[in-house]
Each structure stands twice: as structure tokens, then as C-alpha cells.
């Protein structure tokens, strides 16, 4: 048995992953407020009215946070595989149930609330790409991740076409032990973050040109990398307790908060005059801030008495086939 597949003792939660997931959840909500309120993600553009003084914030939000969430999904999948290998003789059956349960949740979310749902895509890509990759050696998973990231960009594509590559990249990082060491260094994420930030500037400028889709995707990947590295550096400073307090509860209940945010946006949209595409960025930020504040309070209170969020609990039940 190879060193990467040897059974490992049960691991504790990795705080950095919860913080990064919670941070990404905040950005995703800001980006999704208008599309959710409109109920048609293909119609709404990122910017609000033409005289919106904060429209430039779209450069920091649009297509910047879903890469983080996609990477973390690949990380979480491989961590779950490690856990399942230590608890059952058929770990891939556990992962199959997990993905099928996510598919059911995603389809319900899509058809009942918002057709821009990402969970369905995650489940399908997980079934087609992630699950089969568990039989591959880690070097081939890393190589395939690179191919599946470069090819869509070369074909002037972006968005969900990058999800398979990001899934496999997260899986490879876990299987190579990078995630286990994610909080052990300040210098490495600082240098990587600086490199990502410097490289993002020309990509931001080029995304306004002819190859909009390609450079929007490239800029999104680079800025997402810079965000993650910045958080890892800050977690090594005196700001760590504040970051854990603000973002970790949101991250631990990311599925519950993602689904409940859709309901809250749809309810709030009924109270605001004018179509969502005319809302300026300040209105969007106010809606997102209100929802995230309420979710942070609710998540903190819930986690005082429970190990998992309500939707996470149901998902775990479906995954393991028994009540948590």
C-alpha cells in the first residue's frame, strides 16, 4: 500500500479551510444577489446602473470566488476519502452516496428556487471527474488538473468549464500533503500571493479587450489565488481570532448558508422597487451584508449546540447511510 493511501488517524478540523470557505461564501453572495433576484442568471450583468459609483467593485468580485469554492470542494472530497478509508471497506460507495445526495439537493434548489444553482454542476462533475480520479496516482491527478485548467482558457472559455480542473487541483493538493501544511508557513503564501497579485494586473487590463472571457477567467483565477494567500498570511498574525470568529462559522455551515441565502434574496427582492439589474452596487452590498450578518449570528448560535449545520447534518446522514 502506498504512503498516500495508508490509513491515517482521524484528523481535526483545519481552521484555515473553514475561514477560506466562509470568506468565499461572502463573495459568492455579493456576486449572486442580482442573478438570484432576477431568477435568470443569464440575463443579469454584474454592474448596476450606468452611474453606479461602486461598479468598479465588480473587478474584485465577479468570477473571483467560485474558483476558491471549487478548489475547496476538491480538497474536501479527498479529505472525505481519507476519512472513509479509515471507516469502511468500500469508501468510494460512501463518496458516491455523497455526490448523489448533493445532486438531489442541487436539483431541488435549481427547480424550486434558482436555476443558477452550482450544486448540480458540482455533483455531476464530481461523479464524472472526481470519483474516477480516486483510482489514479496523485501525479496523474495533478497533471490532469493542469490540462483541464489550461485547455478551457486556450479555447477562450471560463466559468464552469474550469470546475473540473479546480476540483482535481484541490484533490492533488490534499493528496500531496499541502493541505496538512497549509497553516505552517507565512513566507510561502506571502510570496505566492504577491506573484498572483502582480500577474493579475495585466489580466485585469486585458479582460476589457477582445478576449474578454479568457482574461476574465485568468484574472479570476489569479485574484482568487491572491485572496487565499492573503488569508493564510493573516491567519498567522494577531488577526487570526477575528478571522476565525467572523468567517469560520459561515464556512462550517456553508451548504446551509448557500441555500438559505437564495430564499432570503428572493424575499428581500419583493421589497425593493425596480428590476434587479438596475440596483446599484451599494444596494447589493447592503442586501449581502444584512444576509451574511444574520447568517453569521445564526451559525454561531447553532454551532454552540450542534457539530454540523442542519443541511450538513442531512448531507452527512445521506453520505454515511446512518444518522450522525
Image (cartoon, rainbow, N blue to C red):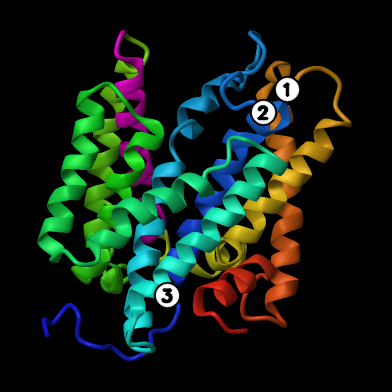
Start-end of magenta stretch: 210-233
Asked whether disc 1 touches disc 2, contact meaning CB atoms under 8 Å apart, the reply is yes
Earlier residue among tags 1 and 2: 2
- Circle 2 Cα neighbour tier, 10 Å, few/some/many (<14 / 14–19 / ≥20): many
User: Which class describes the residues within 10 Å of circle 1: few (<14), some (14-19), or many (20+)?
Assistant: many
Which residue, given by chain and number where applicable, does mark 1 sit on?
Answer: 276
The residue singled out by tag 3 in the image is 94
- Direction from residue 319 to residue 8 in the image, left or right: left
Separation of residues labelled 1 and 2 (CA atoms): 5 Å
Location of residue 110 (image quadrant): top right
Magenta: predominant secondary structure element? Answer: helix
Secondary element under disc 3, as helix, strand or loop, is: helix
Instruction: Specify the quadrant that holds the N terminus.
Output: bottom left
Q: Give the image location of residue 120, x and y in percent.
A: 51, 47
Residue found at x 19% / y 32%: 151
Per the rendering, the mark at residue 34 is: 2
Amino acid at each position: 500500500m502506498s504512503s498516500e493511501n495508508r490509513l491515517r488517524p482521524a484528523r481535526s478540523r483545519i481552521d484555515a479551510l473553514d475561514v477560506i470557505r466562509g470568506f468565499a461564501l461572502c463573495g459568492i453572495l455579493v456576486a449572486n444577489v442580482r442573478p438570484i433576484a432576477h431568477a435568470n442568471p443569464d440575463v443579469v450583468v454584474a454592474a448596476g446602473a450606468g452611474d453606479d459609483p461602486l461598479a468598479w467593485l465588480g473587478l474584485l468580485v465577479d468570477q473571483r470566488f467560485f474558483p476558491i469554492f471549487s478548489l475547496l470542494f476538491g480538497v474536501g472530497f479527498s479529505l472525505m476519502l481519507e476519512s472513509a478509508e479509515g471507516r469502511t471497506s468500500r469508501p468510494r460507495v460512501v463518496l458516491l452516496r455523497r455526490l448523489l445526495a448533493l445532486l438531489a439537493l442541487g436539483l431541488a434548489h435549481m427547480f424550486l428556487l434558482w436555476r443558477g444553482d452550482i450544486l448540480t454542476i458540482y455533483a455531476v462533475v464530481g461523479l464524472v471527474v472526481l470519483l474516477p480520479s480516486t483510482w489514479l496516482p496523485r501525479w496523474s491527478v495533478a497533471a490532469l488538473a493542469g490540462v483541464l485548467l489550461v485547455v478551457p482558457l486556450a479555447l477562450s472559455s471560463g466559468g464552469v468549464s474550469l470546475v473540473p480542473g479546480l476540483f482535481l487541483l484541490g484533490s492533488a493538493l490534499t493528496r500531496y500533503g499541502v493541505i496538512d501544511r497549509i497553516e505552517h508557513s507565512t513566507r510561502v503564501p506571502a510570496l505566492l500571493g504577491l506573484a498572483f497579485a502582480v500577474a493579475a494586473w495585466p489580466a485585469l487590463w486585458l479582460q476589457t479587450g477582445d478576449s474578454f472571457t479568457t482574461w476574465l477567467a485568468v484574472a479570476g483565477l489569479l485574484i482568487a489565488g491572491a485572496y487565499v494567500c492573503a488569508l493564510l498570511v493573516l491567519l498567522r498574525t494577531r488577526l487570526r481570532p477575528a478571522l476565525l470568529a467572523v468567517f469560520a462559522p459561515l464556512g462550517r455551515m456553508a451548504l446551509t448558508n448557500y441555500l438559505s441565502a437564495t430564499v432570503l434574496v428572493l424575499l428581500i427582492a419583493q421589497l425593493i422597487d425596480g428590476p434587479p439589474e438596475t440596483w446599484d452596487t451599494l444596494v447589493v452590498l447592503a442586501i449581502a451584508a444584512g444576509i451574511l450578518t444574520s447568517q453569521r449570528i445564526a451559525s454561531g448560535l447553532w454551532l454552540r449546540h450542534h457539530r454540523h449545520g442542519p443541511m450538513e447534518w442531512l448531507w452527512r446522514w445521506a453520505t454515511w447511510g446512518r444518522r450522525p
